[in-house]
Image (spheres, rainbow, N blue to C red):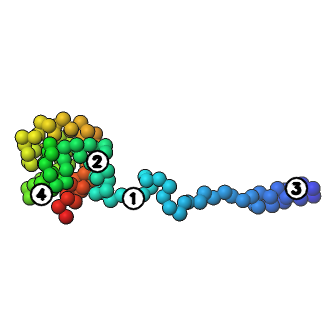
Amino acid sequence: MKKILLLFAVLAMASCKKEETKKEPLYPTSTEEIAQTPEELGAEIFKGKGNCVACHQMDQKVVGPSLKVIAQMYKDKNADMVKFLKGEGEPIVDPSQYEVMKANFAITKAMSDEELGALEAYVYSSIK
C-alpha cells in the first residue's frame, strides 16, 4: 500500500511540474530579424559590402556610369545584369570602363545569387 501511495505522490508531483515556455518578443530584437525588400538589401550591399558606391552614384557618372544609366541600358537591351556581375557577361553600358570594373568581380563573384539579385533590384529601382 505504501508503494502505491508513493507512486501516486510521484506521479502527482510530476504532472504538476510547470514547463517553461520560451516567449517570443513582440518586436524584432536585431536588424537581422527585420524583413528587407530586395531593394533594401541591394542598397545595403551597394553601400557596404560591395563598395559599389565608390564608383557609381544614383544620378551622376563618377568613375563608372550612374545607376540610372545602367538600369535603363540593361532594361532597353533586355540584358542580364547578374550574369555580368558574375563575370560571365559582356559589358554593354561603358565598355571602355570594363577593365576597371573587372577588378571588382572578385567581390561580386563571391556574392550569393540572392545578393546579386538584390543589387540588380536596387539598380532597377533607380528608374521607377
In space, the residues marked 2 and 1 are separated at their CA atoms by: 18 Å
> How would you rate the neighbour count of disc 1 (Cα within 10 Å): few for under 14, some for 14-19, many for 20 or more?
few
Q: Circle 1 is placed at which residue position? A: 35
Q: Mark 4 or mark 2: name the one nearer the start of the chain.
A: 2
> How would you rate the neighbour count of disc 2 (Cα within 10 Å): few for under 14, some for 14-19, many for 20 or more?
few
In space, the residues marked 3 and 4 are separated at their CA atoms by: 81 Å
State whether residue 128 is above or below residue 107.
below
Name the amino acid, label 4: Gln
In space, the residues marked 4 and 2 are separated at their CA atoms by: 21 Å
Q: Residue 92, which numbered label?
A: none
- Looking at the image, which residue is at 50% across and 61% down? 27
Between disc 3 and disc 2, the foreground one is 2
Name the amino acid, label 3: Leu
Using the rendered image of the protein, determine whether residue 78 is visible from the camera's viewpoint: no
Q: Quadrant of the N terminus?
A: bottom right
Kindly indicate whether the residue at mark 4 contacts the one at mark 3 (C-beta within 8 angstroms).
no
Secondary element at image label 3: helix
Q: Circle 4 is placed at which residue position? A: 72
Give 17 or 107, whichever is nearer the viewer: 107
Q: Mark 3 or mark 1: name the one nearer the start of the chain.
A: 3
Name the amino acid, label 2: Lys
Q: Mark 2 or mark 1: name the one nearer the start of the chain.
A: 1
Q: Residue 6, which numbered label?
A: 3
The image quadrant of residue 59 is bottom left
